[in-house]
Amino acid sequence: MPPTYPRGANLEQVKWQNRAVVLETLWRFQPLSRKDLAERTHLTAATLTNIVSELIAAGLVHEVGLGEQLLGRRPMMLSFAPEGYMLIGANLSRTELSIALFDLLLRVHYVLIRPINFRVGSAAETLIHLIGQVITLSKVEPARVLAIGISSPGPLSVEQGVIYAPPQFSDWSNLPLGRLVEQAFNLPVWLENDANANALAELWLGAGRAYNSFIYVESHSGVGSGIILDGRLYAGSAGVGSELGHTSIDRHGPRCPCGNYGCLELYASGPAMIERARTLYHNEEPTRLIHLAGPNLRDLTLDHLIDAALEGDSLALHVIQDACRSLGAGLVNAINLLDPEAVIVGHKLNRLGELALAPIRDVIQQQAIPQAAARPNILVSQRPEPVAVTGAACRALSGLLHRPDLLLRSI
Amino acid sequence: MPPTYPRGANLEQVKWQNRAVVLETLWRFQPLSRKDLAERTHLTAATLTNIVSELIAAGLVHEVGLGEQLLGRRPMMLSFAPEGYMLIGANLSRTELSIALFDLLLRVHYVLIRPINFRVGSAAETLIHLIGQVITLSKVEPARVLAIGISSPGPLSVEQGVIYAPPQFSDWSNLPLGRLVEQAFNLPVWLENDANANALAELWLGAGRAYNSFIYVESHSGVGSGIILDGRLYAGSAGVGSELGHTSIDRHGPRCPCGNYGCLELYASGPAMIERARTLYHNEEPTRLIHLAGPNLRDLTLDHLIDAALEGDSLALHVIQDACRSLGAGLVNAINLLDPEAVIVGHKLNRLGELALAPIRDVIQQQAIPQAAARPNILVSQRPEPVAVTGAACRALSGLLHRPDLLLRSI
DNA sequence: TATAGATTGTTTGAGATGTCAACAAATTCT
DNA sequence: AGAATTTGTTGACATCTCAAACAATCTATA
């Protein structure tokens, strides 16, 4: 692909860009007055009068009452219309399909969760059927649904809306899911890697709200990650996200199925921790874990480990904190390469709070080079429930706010 | 620092942005016709007529003759005016100060190189004096010099133009070099980390011209790197560049002065290779190296190693290719994290060509995950001489092209 | 209670930019 | 010589933001 050139701008683009900027700013910092918006966007008050009138006429924004003011006229505060329009978020995990209906404030209005079998049935039809179900069962007026966001694990082409599933899940392999859903509902659809979508959720709703750049990492069946640079999700040259889980922390470590050696995922994923716990267990006294996972830790899950660690089980704590130190080592590399403002640790690990953060923070404090003055803040995820679909909804919201023509064309 | 909000645009910004886009596009792909520019920038032909007239009137662009055309009117090709205006590039290395005068095509017109002693003299005055010397000795009309770019190793604040030198170089420590030079010549000055500047040079003049994103890496006294994303130099949140040299490839490796363990720099920098050659040498037969570096490889330099490797010396080749495999391991991590289109290996190593590239490429081919379809291209640097100052001049050019008001305000 | 002062929001008209469509210019092919 | 084709130019035009005056709304104070 030859290099793309920066594009020239024209007046229509200015118009839409300004509307996008206003919408995004209002979303992140609502409620705001017209004056506040003018200051933050560096547009003039006159322009904000114009733009806000449009947004109110379109039903996207409401005046929500007068704000406080020490002296002079009190400002009229603006917020997103709470229930004017709706979004659909859908998440495919390895075991289940979650679909939810959100309003434009990303509050949940309806949730549907179904176990799925990747090997059976026609994948796209199932998803389309269930999205339809959510719309009818929630009794939302279909015309008020504006967009659909879909998050899915593992390699996919964001631009083409295709999932490259492993061959054994033949039904999902090379599936142009984005386009199929788009056609079925005649709505804009955004497909996104699940960790990337979760990173966006941190940016919009979670611990990343105060930052312009951060690295998000989560551990479950693998180690997923997403990178936010300059307030935007970094997509990479091929639209495939970042793969912190497959950066190596030990070139002499074991071989990873990906071809590399000593990948972070081999030390810090859920299965890696379970494996480690089983190995260490044989040489230890009986612990709290055996009550949870049965003899020889036969049924051990990551949740068991986390529960046990929270209850003070030393083996579980040891295994988890070891994994967190590995996570820290991988993050040090990413930090030295990208110099982010923050690191956010998410998903299951956030139940552990400081128990997980402390070892990560220690490693980073000691081993990352102090770029400029400050090292990045290390934070725990703060996304609201239902966690799985919120990222997908954020992806749809983010897509919509950057395409205000999709929101305003109707008027 | 609170998050910065995206800013609204207005028509004046559109004007300058379009001029910047046209200038940048013309620079990278000159010669181009007005029609070519219109297609690449997605502006209309009418707009290009207007903008090009301005640029010609300002003396920045010349019509350089008719191009070929199968049918119809032949296009008038445009190029940057070869000698209308000039730029200064300056590079501080650990041992010498290089300053050169360039035209807007980044061709060298005058070079001055001086050995320096970091411990003695007033640093800023020396640099300012020598820049003045270049201007007078080259007999360029001072008013035609438009901007100054300065590259320097090690941590610095791009935005504030300050060099944070190690304390032993007290004269250069916390020096607001950018502002001092700016005031001395009343010209815009850009200060940039040397590896970052070299990455820019690859983008504008070298192996990176065909790519929008790549990772540039060079090995000398350390391992330097620069990241180009989306056709722009990635600056990080604090304006400090990327530090691939201080990403770890082996958490059980030796401790690095930076605090981390097993940093890439400990395996792939010049001093690391020299050390390794000395260690291995004692157990080997006499080699070609002894002729170059004296008994016990007392005076061995990286250049010696490279020369010997080019002449087929097996020890030198072994040491270098080992270092390159380490470099590959570090690059695999960066690739899996950032998914760039290319990797460019520069500086001294490019004398080795495929001898250095092959082991790097092997490691990446085997260990990087194939994101989307293709793995990144692995290339060797192609910058023109004089290598050291070209990066600095590119930084100045890049700065100017993004601020066309600095170029056009005079008319 | 009236008035001054301060702050937010609105209106009007002006200025600037890129665009559109028609046209001019230059070249090849038949 | 004329049709076809491509590049470049011109002037009317639509539209966006902006500046400035103005309206609205609130507090403080005499």
Image (cartoon, coloured by chain):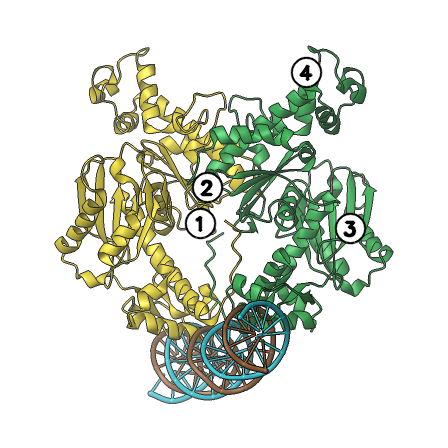
Chain colours: A yellow, B green, C cyan, D brown
For residue B212, above or below residue B166? below
The answer to whether A257 appears left or right of B318 in the picture is: left
Q: Residues within 10 Å of mark 2 (few under 14, many from 20)?
A: some
> What residue sits right under mark 4 in the picture?
B279
Disc assigned to residue B100 = 3
The answer to whether marks 1 and 2 mark residues whose Cβ atoms lie closer than 8 Å is: yes
Give the quadrant of the C terminus of chain B. Answer: bottom right
CA separation in Å, label 1 and label 2: 10 Å
- Amino acid under label 4? Thr
Q: Residue A290: horizontal and vertical position, in percent?
A: 23, 18
Q: Residue B261: horizontal and vertical position, in percent?
A: 55, 26
**Which mark sits nearer the N-terminus, 1 or 2?**
1
- Residue at position x 28%, y 31% in the image: A168
Name the one closer to the observer, B49 or A79. Answer: B49
Question: Is label 4 or label 2 in front?
Answer: 4
> What residue sits right under mark 2 in the picture?
A377
> What residue sits right under mark 1 in the picture?
A211
**Dot 2 lies on which element?**
strand
The answer to whether marks 1 and 3 mark residues whose Cβ atoms lie closer than 8 Å is: no
**Dot 1 lies on which element?**
loop
Residue B403 visible to the viewer: no
Labels 1 and 3 share a subunit = no
Residue B8 visible to the viewer: yes
**Dot 4 lies on which element?**
helix
Question: Is label 1 or label 3 in front?
Answer: 3
CA separation in Å, label 4 and label 2: 41 Å
Choose top left, top right, bottom left or bottom right for residue B272. top right
